[in-house]
Image (cartoon, helix red, strand yellow):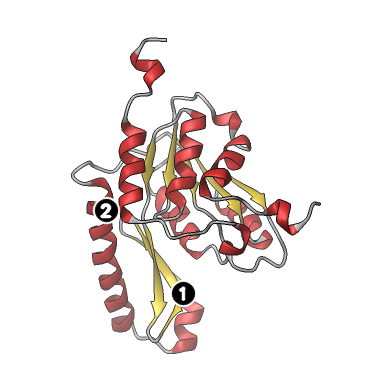
Amino acid sequence: MGTEETRRFHDRRHAGHLLAARLRHYAGRNDVIVLGLPRGGVPVAYEVARELDAPLDVFLVRKLGVPGQEELALGAIASGGIVVINRGLVETVGLTREDIAGIVARERRELERREREYRGDRPPPDLSGRVVILVDDGLATGSTMFAAVHAVRQENPARVVVAVPVSDRDVCDRLGREADEAVCVFTPRPMAAVGFWYEDFSQTSDEEVRELLERARRPAPARTRGG
């Protein structure tokens, strides 16, 4: 099983390398695209895309927090206008339809701002008929990743794969049923916080996300030389 120390990743780049090793069966295919969930998922996704020789883009998901208890997720909103709501929690906390509409509108504005921040004027990628690999740096509750899976499904992909370095075991199992495949390098129990499993879990900046996306779009040197 190994010790806790051996189960920790040095940083997101190291995590991406280990995750890519679990996804090698998708390497070199022209129907694969890797989508990182900003911000922390993008450095992991960059390494996965590079090792699989696949294009990289972002897929934005925003948690919908309960007013006054923002850490408590009542659902999430994702690119493509998809909204996932935990109806049981909404009833428990007594939110009205108007309350939810206001929360969704606020988070949609932020999601659209980040879309422009990261993608500029580039249109979202066409996911129809493709193998979509959704990558984050770790999953505790999985609420944002569940929203991402539901949103990607609306684009008629051939296959949806969830790929993360570390996840709560039950969350990984549930995502394996929601998606076509869930690849989780470590599934500890108890999970603790995602950051516990990284030696360096410093915050990923918007600038780093943009730089990695730009770097991923540049042709590899070997290809430009034709060999």
Please report the residue visible at 56 percent of the width from the left and 53 percent of the height from the top.
Answer: 178
The label on residue 153 is: none
Q: 122 or 2, which lies in front? A: 2
Dot 2 and dot 1 residues touching (CB under 8 Å): no
Task: Classify mark 1: helix, strand or loop.
Answer: strand
- The residue that disc 2 covers is 115
Whether residue 49 is situated above or below residue 63 in the rendered picture: above
Percent x, y for residue 62?
Answer: 37, 64
Which residue is situated farthest in the top direction here? 226
In the rendered image, the quadrant that contains the C terminus is top left
**Is residue 168 something that shows in the picture?**
yes
Camera-side residue of 168 and 161: 168
Q: Which residue is mark 1?
A: 73
Give the image location of residue 22, x and y in percent: 63, 38
Helix, strand or loop for disc 2: helix
Residue at the farthest left position: 121
- Residue in view at x 62 percent, y 35 percent: 21
The Cα atoms of the two marked residues, 2 and 1, are separated by: 21 Å
In the rendered image of this protein, does residue 75 appear above or below residue 81?
A: below
Total marks in image: 2
Which callout, 2 or 1, points to the residue nearer the camera? Answer: 2
Q: Is residue 168 left or right of residue 151?
A: right
Residue depicted at 79% across the width and 52% down the height? 2
Identity, as a three-letter code, of the amino acid under mark 2: Glu
On the question of residue 153 being in view, the answer is: no
Q: Quadrant of residue 169?
A: bottom right
Q: Position of residue 122 (x, y in %)?
A: 22, 41
221 versus 90 height, above or below: above
Q: Is residue 214 above or below residue 189?
A: above
Q: Residue at x 58, y 55 (%)?
A: 175
